[in-house]
Image (cartoon, rainbow, N blue to C red):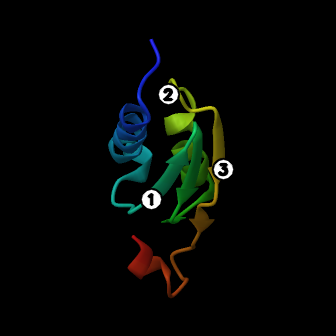
Amino acid sequence: MLLSPDAVAQQVDVAIQSSPYLVGRRLRFEMKDGHVVLQGCVGSYFQKQMAQEAVRRIDGVERIENQLEVLWPGDPLFSSAS
C-alpha cells in the first residue's frame, strides 16, 4: 500500500524524533516526491549517519540528501544548534 506524502513525512519526523542518537537535536527535513533532505547540526559524524539510517527504511523514501553539519563541542555554534 502506497502511503500519502503527508504520512511519509510524518513517519520521517517520528523516526528522527525517536532516535536515541539524536536526543536534543533540532533537526529539520524537507520532503518532495520521496526525496528527503536532512538539515541541521549534530555533534558527530556518527549522529549524522544515524539520522540518515533512521529514515532510510521508511516506505516512500526513495532518496536521502544528508546536509547535516557536524559541529564539535568547542565550536561557538554548537550550543545554539543543540
Mark 1 lies on residue: 28
Look at 60% across and 67% down and name the residue there: 69
Q: Secondary structure at mark 1?
A: strand
Residue 56 screen position, x and y as percent: 57, 33
Look at 58% across and 60% down and name the residue there: 44
Towards the viewer: 12 or 79: 12
User: What residue type is disc 3 on?
Assistant: Glu
Q: Secondary structure at mark 2?
A: loop
Look at 50% across and 88% down and name the residue there: 76
In whole angstroms, how far apart are the C-alphas of marks 1 and 2?
17 Å
Mark 2 lies on residue: 58
Residue 41 screen position, x and y as percent: 52, 67
Q: Secondary structure at mark 3?
A: strand
Give the residue furthest to the top.
1
Q: Are marks 3 and 1 in contact (CB under 8 Å)?
A: no
Look at 49% across and 37% down and name the residue there: 54
First of labels 3, 1 by sequence position = 1
Mark 3 lies on residue: 65
User: What residue type is disc 2 on?
Assistant: Ile
Location of the N terminus (image quadrant): top left
Q: Residues within 10 Å of mark 1 (few under 14, many from 20)?
A: few
Location of the C terminus (image quadrant): bottom left
Residue 46 screen position, x and y as percent: 60, 50
Left/right placement of residue 51 relative to residue 10 reads right
In whole angstroms, how far apart are the C-alphas of marks 3 and 2?
15 Å
